[in-house]
Image (tube, grey):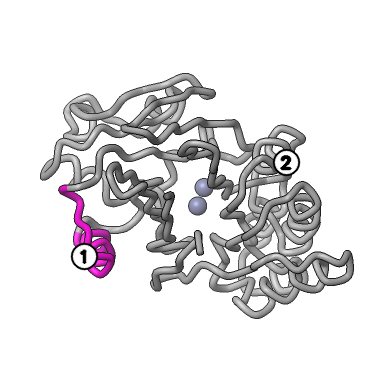
Amino acid sequence: MLEAYTLYSGSGGNCIFVSDGETSILIDAGKSQRAIQTALCSLGRGLESVSAIFLTHEHSDHTSGLEVISKCHRIPVYITAPSYANLVKADSCLSRVAQPQDVVYQVECGELKIRSFPIPHDSAQNVGYIITKGEESVGIATDMGYVTERIASELSLCKWVVLESNHDVEMLKKGPYPYYLKQRILSKGGHLSNELCAKLCVHLAECGVEQITLAHLSRENNTPDLAYNTSKKALEETGHNIILRVAGADTIVKVID
Ligand SMILES: [Zn+2]
Ligand SMILES: [Zn+2]
């Protein structure tokens, strides 16, 4: 049986734990080793039991804990070649454990199958992941400038999905960010708004996705209630009553229930 938890989510750092009880992996390590270890301990786990780390992209909110983790633990770190070239210095601890991959790749870890797919974002490369055990899959897609057909179809095959609901467009436009940053977030290389997330939620519910966890919320340009209500309303208006929840910035949220 698969289990998954968001340990941290948002611009302050991202880390997701996925396990089948035998094999455990992390998607991203964008918090300090201590913070990640603390979160894992509260689940009765630890970094010692993590078999591999899979990175979405090289931005620091997804990678800030990696150097120290790589120094203390020899956990293989899977990363796409473009993000590797951008992130990994030759003399770093990370260079000893990094496993550069094609943008689309598949790895088996115990009985878990982990498959990547491309996501448009202003990094060297960004990918989402589908993690499968037997017949069941959990899909993860964040840091998404816009939703491609590929993203929608990959996620539609999952039972559980972790999906970016980054900002409310009005809050962003009226908010304190400088103009260039607002343009960056709203661009095709930026982040997914609540409204576009809600549309994708409806599509995924129509395809049979059972539970969606909204993730990577902006602290300045969104609130958990706003993100939740935008997708909930769109789902209710189209007659879908799937389980919807919001990942906490610093609180652990169960993705599979
Ligand atoms: Zn990013
Ligand atoms: Zn991010």
Circle 2 crowding by C-alpha within 10 Å: few under 14, some 14–19, many from 20: some
Q: Which mark is residue 152?
A: 2
Question: Was residue 238 drawn as part of the magenta stretch in this picture?
Answer: no
Q: Nearer the viewer, residue 140 or 180?
A: 140
Looking at the rendering, which quadrant does residue 228 occupy?
A: bottom right
Q: Nearer the viewer, residue 109 or 69?
A: 109
**Residue 125 place in picture, x, y as percent:** 53, 32
Question: Was residue 43 drawn as part of the magenta stretch in this picture?
Answer: yes
* Residue type at tag 2: Ala
**Residue 237 place in picture, x, y as percent:** 88, 70
Query: What stretch of residues is rendered in magenta?
Result: 34-48
- Specify the farthest residue to the top: 102
Q: Which mark is residue 41?
A: 1
Dot 1 falls on a residue whose secondary structure is helix
**Residue 186 place in picture, x, y as percent:** 72, 54
Looking at the rendering, which quadrant does residue 51 occupy?
A: top left
Q: Is the magenta stretch mostly helix, strand or loop?
A: helix
Circle 1 crowding by C-alpha within 10 Å: few under 14, some 14–19, many from 20: few
Per the model, the C-alpha gap separating discs 1 and 2 is 34 Å
Q: Nearer the viewer, residue 183 or 34?
A: 34
Q: Residue 139 carries which label?
A: none
Residue at left offset 22%, top offset 24%: 90
* Residue type at tag 1: Cys
- Specify the farthest residue to the bottom: 225
Residue at left offset 65%, top offset 54%: 185
Residue at left offset 57%, top offset 65%: 217
Dot 2 falls on a residue whose secondary structure is helix
**Residue 116 place in picture, x, y as percent:** 52, 31
Residue 28, relative to residue 77: is it above or below?
below
